Amino acid sequence: DIDSIVDLEVSDDVVQLLLMQMERLPAGVRYGLKVASCLGSSTKYSVFDILSKELNVNLRGMLIDAVTKGYMIDCAGGRIQFSHDKVKEAAYEMMTVEDKIENHMNFGLILCSSVLENQTPDNETFFLAVNQLNSGDGCSLSDPSKRLMFATLNLKAGRRAIDLCDYNSALKLLESGMSLLPDDHWKSEYNLSLQMYRVAVDTACTLNNAAAVTKFSQEILTNVEAPLEKLHALFCVMKCLRTASKIQESQQLSYSILQQLGESLPRERGDSDLLAEIDSMRTKVLNMPDESIINMKESTRKEKDMLLL
């Protein structure tokens, strides 16, 4: 009885007992459980349908058999999940380390291909696909072109996670992408590296992860050629300092950014000339017709203006 087994106190004994029980299952059910354990605790049936076509097996049928035997549960929304975390752990332990890596890589490639070919975006399946590739140990790949492809997929997935406001997942995906870049990536893959590190420093800044901001911004400051890109990294460091209540350090860094932008350093609040200029600008704007404001020319120095703001 599965419920009785998972209620045992010693977790290692639970997994071993479940493994012994699973070894007596039909081969098809065992295979279905192995596949499901690679994908996670809960997965959509549609994902298994995609894999079934490429693997030439009926995974849905295998999993339905697993449900009848108590190893898995049918859920709302066309999903299926393991009946207990220990069941998933035992199913995963039926495979060797080599089999696990091979399956993760294979499943990731199949799912990525399906998602990228599909015109309707499916974020859940895309994230699952990229995470499968990462679990498949892409860093061990010897083919540089495949490593770059996986790095680019991690960047794309990271950006999608940001769009969904899942910044923690985004940062993990971006770090996985960075690990796949070649040693000389700032020379051989400059544009991809710049995109990866700029998105990463922004994401770390949003999470107020000062250590990550410092790490990624240092990479940018050391390797990037464009002055404005360096200033953007410094701006993220400044924001983290301010959030950490390191006001003086943040202020000093903000003055450094202004100087590098070619702007004058801020004057004291009581400066009479400053007050007169503010008053003059306020009066000028108040007296401008709406049409003049609407028809104002677009700034030619957008990135500088964003940093100044």
Image: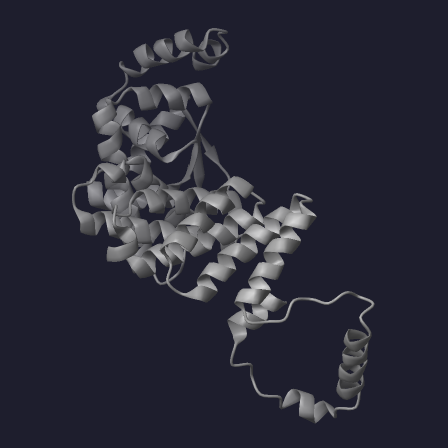
Q: Residue at x 19, y 48 (%)?
A: 144
* Image coords of residue 263 (percent x, y): 60, 71
Q: How does the figure colour the protein chain or chains? A: one colour
Q: Would you identify the image quadrant in which residue 221 lies?
A: bottom left
**Foreground residue among 121 and 232:** 232
Q: Give the answer, above or below, for where 253 lies relative to 52.
A: below
Q: Give the answer, above or below, for where 60 lies relative to 294.
A: above
Q: Residue at x 59, y 45 (%)?
A: 208
**Foreground residue among 190 and 32:** 190
Q: Would you identify the image quadrant in which residue 60 lies?
A: top left
Examine the rendering and report whether any part of residue 206 can be seen.
yes
Q: Quadrant of the N terminus?
A: top left
Examine the rendering and report whether any part of residue 161 can be seen.
no
**Residue 164 relative to residue 99: left or right:** right
Q: Which residue is farthest left? A: 143
**Looking at the image, how many numbered discs can be counted on the residues?**
0
Q: Give the answer, above or below, for where 14 lies relative to 121.
A: above
**Residue 246 relative to residue 124: left or right:** right
* Image coords of residue 193 (percent x, y): 34, 55
* Image coords of residue 187 (percent x, y): 26, 56
* Image coords of residue 91 (percent x, y): 33, 22
Q: Quadrant of the C terminus?
A: bottom right
**Foreground residue among 309 and 118:** 309
